[in-house]
Amino acid sequence: MQKTLARPVEFKGVGLHSGAAARMVLRPAPAGHGIVFLRTDVDGGARIPARWDLVTPSRLCTLLEGKGGVTISTIEHIMAALAGTGVHNALIELDGPEVPILDGSAAPFVNGILEAGLRGQSAPLRAIRVLKTVVVREGESYACLTPADHLEMAFAIDFSDEAIGAQKKELDLANGAFVRELMDSRTFCRQSDVEAMQANGLALGGTYFNAVVVDGDRVLSPGGLRHEDEPVRHKMLDAVGDLALAGAPLLARYVGHRAGHALTNRLLRALFADPDAWEWTTCSPDLEGRLPGAGVTAPAPVPPQRAVA
């Protein structure tokens, strides 16, 4: 069955790229509503559904563009948190153009969602079953979806910096694996990239405390890495969020090799462009038990966000 939040929950912080203060409130929504963003700072409000076909090209993040050119950026971490906790319907109110970055991972969002609680809804849950392999490539990078009976993921990255290097990881995302394995892994970058981005008006809200910054063989962020392979885990976290823009749980195996936001969105576009590559299926209780958010009930060990009325 579909699920929504039991009560609203608020998050406050700054946008990673804009550096602007941001307040975001997740509110319960009725069955069939899906995940929808609402820009409360726009006259009359501007609603933007979290959908793959509303993604517009953007550097370094996933950006949605709605009617009238209204945008919301850096949505990948909150989308991953919603998918990883099994929230299917929510209204996300945001008072600006960028989701707050918080600690650079999805953990604060997951904690806030679970602190607020989930509520079952009397409507069946549908999933998207991938029926055949779909692949997109760009240079040495590629991403693909192949048939599977629940979401599985394999990812590989390769960076020249010794602090990152070549990493790969495979994960069965059934039944809470996102919360156990991926949610606390932070976005990462190289010190030279930070300087270049800020010179071009990006990463203005970035700090050593909301991103893992490396320089050669050194991790500059205090406390070092949360996991030895935190960078590839974060890439997987991003992919979970970007795949959630399909609009329903995916029953597929995702493989990413040096892939990013744009390539994963191209993959969804290729999937939905081929009507023979996918189908809708109504989830049985057994299938629901294999989805990423199944069985996730306790808050994660991260300071909770404040629930609001």
Image (cartoon, rainbow, N blue to C red):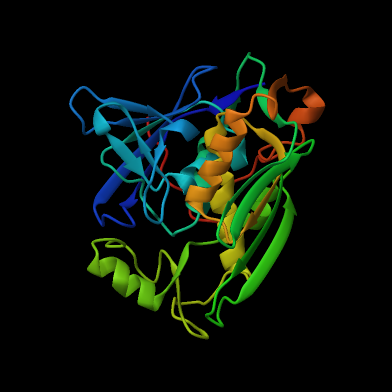
When the figure is inspected, residue 230 is found, relative to residue 135, above or below; the finding is: below
**Is 91 positioned to the left or the right of 174 in the image?**
left
Looking at the image, which residue is at 62% across and 22% down? 2
Q: Nearer the viewer, residue 223 or 220?
A: 220
Residue 301, visible in the rendered structure: no
Residue 229, visible in the rendered structure: yes
**Is 282 positioned to the left or the right of 46 in the image?**
right
**Is 215 positioned to the left or the right of 241 in the image?**
left
Residue pushed farthest top?
A: 122
Percent across and percent down for residue 108 are: 48, 51
Percent across and percent down for residue 247 are: 55, 29
**Is 22 positioned to the left or the right of 283 in the image?**
left
Looking at the image, which residue is at 40% across and 68% down? 209
Q: Nearer the viewer, residue 233 or 269?
A: 269
Looking at the image, which residue is at 82% across and 28% down? 286
Which quadrant of the figure has residue 119? top right
Residue pushed farthest right?
A: 286
When the figure is inspected, residue 260 is found, relative to residue 124, above or below; the finding is: below
When the figure is inspected, residue 298 is found, relative to residue 165, above or below; the finding is: above
